[in-house]
Amino acid sequence: MATVRVQEALFDLAAETAALTAGRTDVGAVASFLGVCRADDGLAAMVLEHYPAMTERALRRIAAEAEARWPLTGCTVIHRVGRILPGEPIVLVLTASTHRAAALESCAFLIDWLKTRAPFWKCEEFADGTRRWVEARADDEAAAARWGEQVAADAPGEGAPARRQREAEPAAE
Amino acid sequence: MATVRVQEALFDLAAETAALTAGRTDVGAVASFLGVCRADDGLAAMVLEHYPAMTERALRRIAAEAEARWPLTGCTVIHRVGRILPGEPIVLVLTASTHRAAALESCAFLIDWLKTRAPFWKCEEFADGTRRWVEARADDEAAAARWGEQVAADAPGEGAPARRQREAEPAAE
Amino acid sequence: MRVLYFAWLRQKIGLAEEEAAPPPDEVRDVAGLIRWLAARSPGHAAAFAEPRLVRAAVNQEFATPDTPVAPGDEVAFFPPVTGG
Amino acid sequence: MRVLYFAWLRQKIGLAEEEAAPPPDEVRDVAGLIRWLAARSPGHAAAFAEPRLVRAAVNQEFATPDTPVAPGDEVAFFPPVTGG
């Protein structure tokens, strides 16, 4: 069962990593991805907004998809929200498995899907006071698409219609 | 310039990660791979032997290859030697870049090449006192081969002939 | 029907959420709801001016233009997501 | 010539390293050195019995059977690497 959290606070990389191996001796590989706030173009801060009622469910579904595709012994996704300063982490993905291919591939998969299928929006604040909403990138969509469609069944009671989750189409034509 | 270390001691994942982002705001992604000692088949310990005069040079060359292939802002490879207990880490690969693809791909590349091109040998010790040298795996060779041949020029003064480093062929036919 | 707005849609409309009661015989899906909402105010019109930039969720599931909407649903509108 | 052995080659031969002075006109490359070393003792013969399992490095660079060897070189023999 994956660990999924949305929080304003910083997270502890070493503690989260240790939690995936603690008390077990079948873990041979832990892969991680840490997304960090850059200071491009004089960025002063990044403000992350999300859709609270939906976010954790979306993250949990993405993690369940990784667990359906790879034999993981553990999986952790932590996404920060609120005001984030340059140099601070934004997101952490951790995957553990007996062998390295499963850990490395599922880690790449998780960050690709997270970027296109979890309801977060970034607003950049610059030193001169201007703000700008970050636009979605076509290459993020392409990176997510290379993993194909959802294979995991939706969890029972997770919203009525078995509609497949996707982000590619606009809401109106 | 990559950080490369061979050591008996445990390493500090959080400190090594922090070192890659400290004082800079152009790092957007840090990927890591941690290889951990499993307790398969009643393994009591793993003893890692290496070729001291060659090891650091080999690791440095592998890291230089990653830096030649991807625009990395930082790269750290730490490989432990000596006696390692189940649950303990064996190897750490950390890569940092402005964007995630470079960090994730170079991290996978580094561990694949490290497994086939760095002079380490694992001896397994079991609870009943027996010992067994770990055999190289054909799928490790295949994983390394998917990245193709070396593209980085050898560093000046790094051994006379510009012979390409490889491990595929036996030393005698 | 509860309607939520995020990111620049929220800013253009000036509301994070509102109650709406579109006539059920006129508004049957996400696309119909967008047409109906766009007529509510200049802010709504601006937010929905370029529908290709707008994504939606119905009851916290990503939706498409033909996803049905009904009284009691929670419908959210937002730009393409940019987390990670 | 300094010859090093690692892992099970070291154990079979019973030495981590040794000095060797193979006749230069007879031993010109890694393959020739292996043939010459294999005749030194039963341990050497056992270590080199299956050459397809043996890898080599000359002066700390991975080598192949046709890699030249000369007096003064450091030549190492070992199984395929298993680090990582």
Image (cartoon, coloured by chain):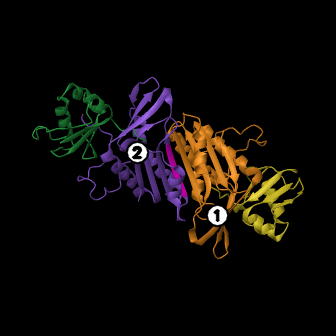
Chain colours: A purple, B orange, C green, D yellow
Expressed as whole percent of the image width and height from the top left, the position of residue A136 reads 38, 34
Q: Residue at x 53, y 59 (%)?
A: A99
Nearest the viewer among B91 and D5 is: B91
- The amino acid type of the residue labelled 1 equals Glu
Q: Quadrant of the N terminus of chain C?
A: top left
Q: Which mark is residue A114?
A: 2
Q: Are marks 1 and 2 in contact (CB under 8 Å)?
A: no
Expressed as whole percent of the image width and height from the top left, the position of residue A64 reads 38, 55
Region in magenta: A29-34
Residue D48 visible within the image: no
Q: Which residue is mark 1?
A: B135
Q: Residue at x 50, y 58 (%)?
A: A20
- Name the image quarter holding residue D52: bottom right
Number of the front mark, 1 or 2: 2
By secondary structure, the bulk of the magenta-drawn segment is best described as strand
Query: Residue A33 lies in magenta, yes or no?
Result: yes
Nearest the viewer among B145 and A91 is: A91
Q: Is residue A93 left or right of residue C1?
A: right
Q: Is residue A63 left or right of residue C26?
A: right
User: Mark 1 and mark 2, same subunit?
Assistant: no
Expressed as whole percent of the image width and height from the top left, the position of residue B58 reads 70, 48
Q: Which mark is residue D56?
A: none
Q: Secondary structure at mark 1?
A: loop
